[in-house]
Image: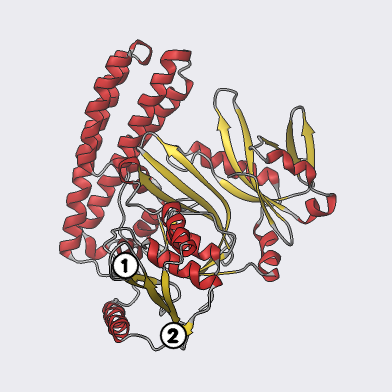
C-alpha cells in the first residue's frame, strides 16, 4: 500500500475533511495506527469528544476503490477520522497487525457481490445488452414524457418571442422563470437550465441593451427543441420494435449529443448497454477549473483529459448543487495518470463527458510524454475546418477542445497567434497565465503541444482559441486554474 498527500487530498473529497483530519493529527488524537502484513489495510483508533475512541480504517483490498470505515456518527464520507488516519500514517510509525475479523467478513461480502455481478453480466452483443420488452416499454414511456415536455417548452419559447425580447422587463422575466420550473417534471433538466441561462442573459441585456447573446441562446433552444422532438420520435419507433433495432440506430444514439443536451440522467449500466464504455483506459488531466453555473444553480468541477490509449480529449464534470454542497464531494486537480478498468462515456460527437467508479493513480513516465505528440493536430487548415463544422451544429459543444502541435508563436497586436508549417494562423485569446507562453524557449516550443479551447465570437464574427496547457517532452504547464 503506497500513497501520498495528493492521494489523501483527492480521497478526502473536500477541503473541510482534509483540514479537520490534519487538525486531529496535530492534536495527537490517534492512539494507535496499524497496518496489515500485506499492506492492504490501514486501521487505528482516534480519540473523539466521547469516552471511547473511534475505530477507523481505510481498506485497499481493491486498490482502484479504497473503502473508508469508521465507528463515528458522521454522515460525511470519508469522515475526518479516516482522512486523518491516512495523514498520520504518512509521518508516523505504524505497527504490523492482523486484519480484524470484522474487516475480513466485510471483504468477503464485497467479493461475493462482485462475483455475483460478474456472473450475471450478459455476453457482449451487437444489440443493446439485456434489452427486454419491459425495458423497451419503460424507455418509450420516458421518451413520451420528454416529448410532452418539449411541446411545453416550445409554447413557452413562442410566447416569449411573441412578446418580444426587448419589451420584457424584470417582472415579465420573473413570471416566465416560474413557468420554466415545470420542465423539471419532464426529465428535461438540460432544457430547463438553458431557459434559466436565457433569462439571466436577458436580465443583463436590460442593462446594456445588447441582445446578441440572448438571440444566440434562443436559436440554441429552438434547435434543441426541434431536433429533440425528431430524435425522441425516432427513438420511440426504434424501441416499439426493439427486437430488430438496427446497429446503425444504436451508433447514431452513441454519437448524438441530444440526450446530453436534453439533460437525460444516465445510469452507468445504461451506458454499458449502449456500448458507451472502454476497458483499461489511461487518462492524463491537462486542465481543471471550477465554474459557477447560475442556470443550473450549481458549481461545476470540470477536468479536461487526454486519453493515452485512444488519443482523444474527454471531459469530466462533477455537478455540486448550491443547496447540497455539504453532501457532494468536490473534485480536485491531479497531475498523475488515472488507470481506469472501466470508463463510461456519454453520447457525443467530440469531447465526450466520461465517468468511472474506480481507478488507480500512477506517476507520469517518459513513455507517456513520447506518446502525446502523435495525438496532436498538425495541419491547422484541416483543424479549423473541423472546428467550424462542429460549431455549425447547434447541439454539439460550443467550445471544442483539441491538442495542437506547436510550430511558430506570433505577436498579433496585443494578442498572440500560432502558425503551422504552411503559415496557417490560429488567433489566441490569453487566459490569466496565457502570456507565459512568451517565456517558453524555442527548443521547448519545437517539442511542444498546446491544448486549445476554441470559441466563436458572434458579436465580432471571429474564431479564436484559448490556450489551456502546454506539453513538451518532460512537463505539463497549465494556464488555467
Q: Position of residue 26 (x, y in %)?
A: 49, 62
Colour pattern of the rendering: secondary structure
In this view, the mark in front (1 or 2):
2
Q: Position of residue 230 (x, y in %)?
A: 30, 42
For residue 248, what is the image quadrant?
Answer: bottom left
Mark 1 or 2, nearer chain start:
2
Residue at the (64%, 37%) spot, across then down = 432
Residue at the (40%, 32%) spot, across then down = 220
Question: Which of these two is toward me, 247 or 81?
Answer: 81
- Secondary element under disc 2, as helix, strand or loop, is loop
Residue bearing the label numbered 1: 127
Left or right, 136 with reference to 259: left
Farthest right residue in view? 442
Q: Is residue 314 visible?
A: yes
Question: Which of these two is toward me, 170 or 460?
Answer: 170
Q: Position of residue 327 (x, y in %)?
A: 32, 52
Structural crowding at the residue carrying mark 2, measured as other residues with C-alpha within 10 Å and reported as few (<14), some (14–19) or many (≥20): some
Residue at the (24%, 66%) spot, across then down = 131
Left or right, 17 with reference to 263: right
Q: Quadrant of the C terminus?
A: top right
Left or right, 16 with reference to 189: right
Left or right, 207 with reference to 52: right
- Secondary element under disc 1, as helix, strand or loop, is loop
> Disc 1 to disc 2, how far (Cα)?
46 Å
- In the drawing, what numbered circle is on residue 36? 2
Structural crowding at the residue carrying mark 1, measured as other residues with C-alpha within 10 Å and reported as few (<14), some (14–19) or many (≥20): some
For residue 411, what is the image quadrant?
Answer: top right
Q: Position of residue 389 (x, y in %)?
A: 54, 41
Question: Which of these two is toward me, 464 or 328?
Answer: 328
- Residues at discs 1 and 2 in contact (Cβ within 8 Å): no
Amino acid at each position: 500500500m503506497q500513497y501520498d498527500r495528493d492521494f489523501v487530498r483527492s480521497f478526502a473529497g473536500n477541503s473541510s475533511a482534509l483540514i479537520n483530519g490534519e487538525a486531529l493529527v496535530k492534536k495527537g488524537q490517534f492512539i494507535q495506527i496499524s497496518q496489515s502484513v500485506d499492506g492492504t489495510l490501514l486501521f487505528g483508533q482516534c480519540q473523539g469528544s466521547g469516552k471511547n475512541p473511534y475505530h477507523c480504517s481505510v481498506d485497499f483490498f481493491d486498490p482502484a476503490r479504497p473503502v473508508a470505515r469508521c465507528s463515528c456518527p458522521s454522515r460525511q464520507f470519508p469522515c475526518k477520522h479516516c482522512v486523518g488516519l491516512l495523514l498520520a500514517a504518512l509521518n508516523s510509525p505504524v505497527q504490523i497487525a492482523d486484519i480484524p475479523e470484522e474487516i475480513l467478513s466485510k471483504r468477503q461480502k464485497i467479493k461475493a457481490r462482485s462475483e455475483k455481478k460478474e456472473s450475471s453480466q450478459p455476453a457482449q452483443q451487437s444489440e443493446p445488452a439485456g434489452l427486454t420488452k419491459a425495458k423497451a416499454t419503460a424507455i418509450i414511456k420516458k421518451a413520451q414524457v420528454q416529448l410532452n415536455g418539449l411541446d411545453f417548452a416550445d409554447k413557452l419559447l413562442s410566447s416569449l418571442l411573441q412578446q418580444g425580447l426587448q419589451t420584457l422587463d424584470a417582472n415579465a422575466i420573473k413570471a416566465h422563470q416560474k413557468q420554466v420550473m415545470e420542465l423539471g417534471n419532464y426529465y428535461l433538466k438540460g432544457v430547463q437550465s438553458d431557459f434559466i441561462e436565457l433569462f439571466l442573459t436577458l436580465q443583463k441585456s436590460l442593462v446594456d441593451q445588447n441582445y446578441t447573446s440572448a438571440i444566440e441562446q434562443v436559436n440554441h433552444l429552438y434547435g434543441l427543441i426541434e431536433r429533440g422532438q425528431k430524435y425522441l420520435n425516432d427513438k420511440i419507433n426504434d424501441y416499439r420494435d426493439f427486437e430488430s433495432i438496427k446497429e446503425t440506430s444504436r451508433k447514431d444514439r452513441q454519437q448524438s449529443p441530444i440526450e446530453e443536451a436534453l439533460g437525460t440522467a444516465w445510469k452507468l449500466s445504461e451506458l454499458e448497454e449502449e456500448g458507451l464504455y472502454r476497458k483499461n483506459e489511461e487518462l492524463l488531466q491537462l486542465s481543471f477549473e471550477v465554474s459557477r453555473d447560475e442556470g443550473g444553480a450549481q458549481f461545476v468541477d470540470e477536468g479536461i483529459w487526454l486519453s493515452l490509449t485512444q488519443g482523444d480529449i474527454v471531459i469530466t464534470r462533477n455537478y455540486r448543487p448550491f443547496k447540497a454542497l455539504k453532501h457532494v464531494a468536490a473534485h480536485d486537480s491531479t497531475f498523475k495518470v488515472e488507470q481506469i478498468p472501466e470508463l463510461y462515456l456519454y453520447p457525443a460527437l467530440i469531447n465526450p463527458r466520461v465517468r468511472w467508479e474506480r481507478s488507480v493513480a500512477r506517476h507520469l513516465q517518459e513513455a507517456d510524454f513520447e506518446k502525446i505528440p502523435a495525438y496532436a493536430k498538425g495541419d491547422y487548415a484541416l483543424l479549423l475546418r473541423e472546428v467550424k463544422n462542429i460549431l455549425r451544429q447547434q447541439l454539439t459543444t460550443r467550445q471544442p477542445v483539441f491538442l495542437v502541435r506547436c510550430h511558430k508563436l506570433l505577436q498579433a497586436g496585443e494578442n498572440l497567434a500560432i502558425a503551422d508549417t504552411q503559415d496557417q494562423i490560429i488567433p489566441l485569446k490569453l487566459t490569466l497565465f496565457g502570456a507565459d507562453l512568451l517565456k517558453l524557449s524555442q527548443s521547448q516550443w519545437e517539442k511542444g503541444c498546446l491544448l486549445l479551447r476554441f470559441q466563436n465570437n458572434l458579436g465580432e464574427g471571429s474564431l479564436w482559441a484559448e490556450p489551456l496547457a502546454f506539453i513538451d517532452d518532460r512537463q505539463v504547464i497549465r494556464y488555467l486554474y
